[in-house]
Image (cartoon, rainbow, N blue to C red):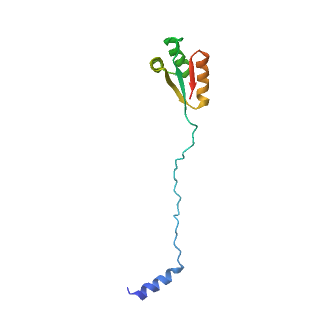
């Protein structure tokens, strides 16, 4: 085709409007980061008064540890002087810390 014919065809098409947006809408999933409360740690400290069995039972009853978890934490407290026994928000850990303290154990939330 020569240029004149192409120009005429284009001038006839000026009145046509082309769709620039799709006729459908896509569902898009977006992951949203939520600012969470910083995690706190419930730390149990060693003492010279409480027996291994008492500490193990306390961890099982208060922190819902399995017997294996409670034994491992008790040994860590004995040899290392302290152990992180539970993590979570302050509101989640505070009743557990209070219960351990009420039993005569040395615990804190850090």
Quarter that holds the C terminus: top right
In the rendering, at what x and y percent does residue 4 appear? 42, 88
Q: How many labels were placed on the picture?
A: 0
In which quarter of the view is residue 7 placed? bottom left
Task: Pinpoint residue 14: horizontal percent, then vertical percent.
Answer: 52, 80
Q: Along the horizontal axis of the image, is 95 left or right of 21?
A: right
Residue 26: where, in percent of width, then height?
Answer: 51, 56
Quadrant including the N terminus: bottom left
> Would you place residue 67 above or below residue 7 in this image?
above
Residue shown at 50% from the left, 15% from the top = 56
Left or right: residue 91 compared with residue 19: right
Farthest bottom residue? 4
Residue at (53, 74) in percent of width and height: 17
Between 37 and 81, the one lying in front of the other is 81
Q: Where is residue 63 in the image (x, y as percent from the top left)?
A: 54, 22
Q: Residue at x 51, y 17 (%)?
A: 46
For the point 59% across and 29% down, the residue is 92
What residue occupies the far left of the structure in this picture?
Answer: 1
């Amino acid at each position: 085709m020569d240029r004149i014919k192409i120009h005429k065809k284009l001038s006839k098409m000026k009145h046509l409007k082309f769709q620039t947006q799709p006729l459908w809408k896509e569902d898009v999933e977006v992951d949203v980061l939520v600012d969470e409360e910083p995690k706190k740690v419930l730390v149990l400290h060693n003492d010279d008064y409480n027996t291994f069995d008492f500490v193990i039972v306390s961890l099982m009853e208060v922190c819902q540890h399995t017997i294996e978890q409670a034994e491992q934490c008790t040994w860590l407290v004995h040899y290392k002087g302290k152990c992180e026994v539970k993590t979570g928000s302050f509101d989640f850990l505070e009743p557990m810390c209070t219960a351990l303290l009420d039993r005569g154990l040395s615990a804190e939330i850090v």
